Amino acid sequence: MIKSIIESFSNLFAKSETINYPYEQIAKFKNYRGLIEYSADECIFCYKCEKVCPPDAIVFKPTKEKNRLYEYNPNLCIYCGECVRNCPKEDLALWQSEKKPKII
Amino acid sequence: MKKTITIPLGSQHISLLEPVRFNFSCENEKITDVDYNVGFVHRGIEKACTEKFEYKQVGYVVARVCGLCAITHTMAYTLGIEHILNIKTNKKIDYLRILMLELDRIHSHLLCLAHTAENSGFEGMFMKIMGDRELVMDIQEAISGNRVQFDFVCIGGVNRDISTECEKLAFTNLALLDKKVDDLIGKFTSNWSTALKYKNIGALSYDDAFNFNALGPLARAAGAAIDVRAESSILPYKEVGYKMILGQNGDIYDRNLVRLKEIKNSILMCQNILSGLTEGEILVKFKGKPNGESFTRLEAPRGEIFYYLNANGTNMLQRVRIKTPTFSQIPGMVEIFKGSDYADAPAILASFDPCMSCTAK
Amino acid sequence: MSIVFSFMLGFFAPIYGGIFYGIDRVLKAKMQRRKGPPVLQPFYDMLKLFSKTKFIVNAPHTIWMIFYFLSLWAVVFMIFFGGNLLYIIFGHLLATVFFIISGYSVNSIFSQLGSNRKLLSVVAYEPILIVNAICIYLVFGTFEISEILAAPNNFNSLVFTFLSLLFVVPTVLKLSPFDASKAHQEIVGGIEVEFGGVFYELVYAAKFLEMIFVYSFIFILASNDYIFGTFLVVFSFFAVALVDNSTARIKIDSLLKALYMYGFGLGIVSIFWILLCCI
Ligand code: SF4
Ligand code: SF4
């Protein structure tokens, strides 16, 4: 008990461990797993990413102009990186950024 | 007139992390009978693993069984499927896997200690331990890139190698944490109020530990040498400096100490692994579809988890059966509750470290 | 002290009490190395609670609680008007009893358990308050606060009274280790659990009044030396916060034992100390 009291007292003068979050940003680590980014120019439309994605965050949908349009749902994505690992043109067509999804 | 009062604990209660419902029949705060219900978070994961997801994806699905021992679940599944597919991993992969497992154990144990402190009304200690826990969470985040669901292990290896920067961070943080754990041991053993709250409270005897099939730290606190890490050789635990830690009385106090000492042991293991890590491939290529069945046992932070897999040569598995440690701890838990005070119930509950979403899946 | 000033002090007690409470929370956050809420957080809470639906479990429940709040406020007025110490203690007891009855009047098991425990803790701390009032009487020869505050400083003879009052403070304020009657994690706040909206705000404000009640006991120990009195209050404020931060909650029977053995024991020691050594 005495030890805890001493520590509590010395903590009064210590720096706080928490931060004032929305105003101060959290420090991110290098190679943080963020949003998946895609470039349509490089893609060869092999659909491997669509096939491996566990929560179906990546889907290719047919539209009027294009027969297959890449669609990515950041709210479903679990940031596992499996799509990137399976893409034949990794880093060119599909890569993992360090961005965070927008808070709506 | 009715002699007893019924106190509900759950399914929503401040002292609960997860939904579970206990109905205590009490005689003036002394618990005489317990009724429980654990199935509040059933998500049908076992079924989904066999119907919706292919075997390569199941690793990511079972990680969602539990937020705390995510790594352990994926690990157990992966070991099982690798057994079926006959994949031999190299030393480096094994070591990296143990590293993550032990880091996971450290942070899970710290959470449990914090939660036990909080449930016995010790907010200061709660905040302190949660603050210290950030150290190990940081290591995990730096290594795997994710903070909670690491998705680090995959079939045939691991997803990421460890960089020198991460290694440095890990060494400094672990050394810091080691000191803090020593300090915590001092604080847990020399406090008048925690002694009142923990000593001889919620004790599970050595015999009862066997009778009620106790697992993990719960059994080890009672003196029963039950630990998959010592029993199976699926991961090279002996090489990295594993040591069995046993308590005597099986009360909350002993459980806390066993956890703290296990954290120290885990820190030692992590340091050994990090200093002995060799260069090598982190992913073994494999071919073919699984055909056959496997049983896997692995020591999760809370005790033994068990996976049964059955595959029939297609992309879909036929059966995935998960048995989690909390499932086998519930009979012991109910037995301990009988005869103790309601005032101790939250602390006892937390000291069991129950994981309800694991149990209900 | 002029009557107007006393009246102001009493009337605005829930407001500056709120500031004390805010400071308390910031201090506690600092001790736990957190940023913590702003000092004015109790008032933000108040605004939010006012905007909630006024939900009443049953009429007696709320009415007893309002009685509790009003009588507690009356007690605070009595303190600032320099009233009689014994009246104040019993007034506070009456207020607490209202609160306990209010807890019993709902059909919620947590509220009733909270009432049980509160009753036991009242049984534990009330004798200590009375013994200490006797000590104060022995030293100053009066129960009137206005006369005590005018008497010369005689803290040497009241050292043990001060120590024994330090046991009462966390019990009345429901702070660790003597917070079994509130026991957030066991009985979800005890009596407080069934109030909502504006009515919870009254319970919340009552906490500030309780703070003023116990700390004024400590303040009068320094009699006419107001600076020393303030120092005592600040010291005990710190001591209580530190202990709150470094102990677990003990069970209600351990609480009774601890309070009778140390709190009441120190009170008795104090009587002997005054009788044998100081007079
Ligand atoms: S990171 Fe995982 S969840 Fe996200 S899109 Fe890629 S495969 Fe799907
Ligand atoms: S895996 Fe890569 S190349 Fe194939 S469809 Fe997806 S983004 Fe395009």
Image (spheres, grey):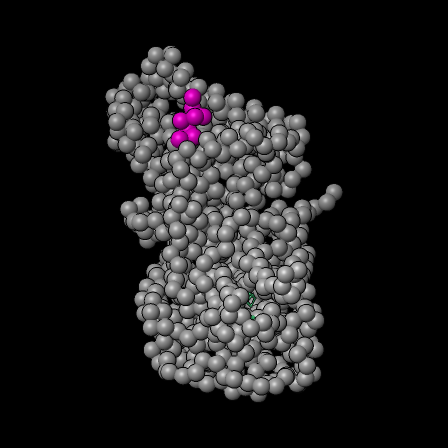
* In this picture, residue B87 sits left or right of residue B238: right
| Residue B2 colored in magenta in the image | no
Q: Nearer the viewer, residue B311 or C136?
A: B311
Count of marks placed on residues:
0
- Secondary structure mainly formed by the magenta segment: helix
* In this picture, residue C200 sits left or right of residue C221: right
Instruction: Say which residue appears at 35% left-offset and 36% top-offset.
Output: C237
- Provide the residue span drawn in magenta: C12-19
Instruction: Say which residue appears at 43% left-offset and 26% top-offset.
Output: C15
In the rendered image of this protein, does residue A89 appear above or below residue C29? below
- Residue extending farthest to the front is A65
* In this picture, residue B332 sits left or right of residue B229: right
Q: Nearer the viewer, residue C255 or C1?
A: C1
* In this picture, residue C113 sits left or right of residue B94: right
Q: Does residue A7 appear in the picture of this structure?
A: yes
In the rendered image of this protein, does residue B340 appear above or below residue B106? above
Instruction: Say which residue appears at 44% left-offset and 44% top-offset.
Output: C176
Where ligand 1 lies, by image quadrant? bottom right
Q: Position of residue B181 (x, y in %)?
A: 37, 63
- Residue extending farthest to the right is B1
Q: Does residue B219 appear in the picture of this structure?
A: no
In the rendered image of this protein, does residue C264 appear above or below residue A96? above
Q: Position of residue B46 (x, y in %)?
A: 67, 69
In the rendered image of this protein, does residue B36 appear above or below residue B165? above
Q: Nearer the viewer, residue B297 or B261?
A: B297
Q: Position of residue C45 (x, y in %)?
A: 49, 34
Q: Toward which corner of the image does residue C192 lie, by quadrant?
A: top right
Q: Position of residue C272 (x, y in %)?
A: 33, 33
Instruction: Say which residue appears at 30% left-offset and 32% top-offset.
Output: C232
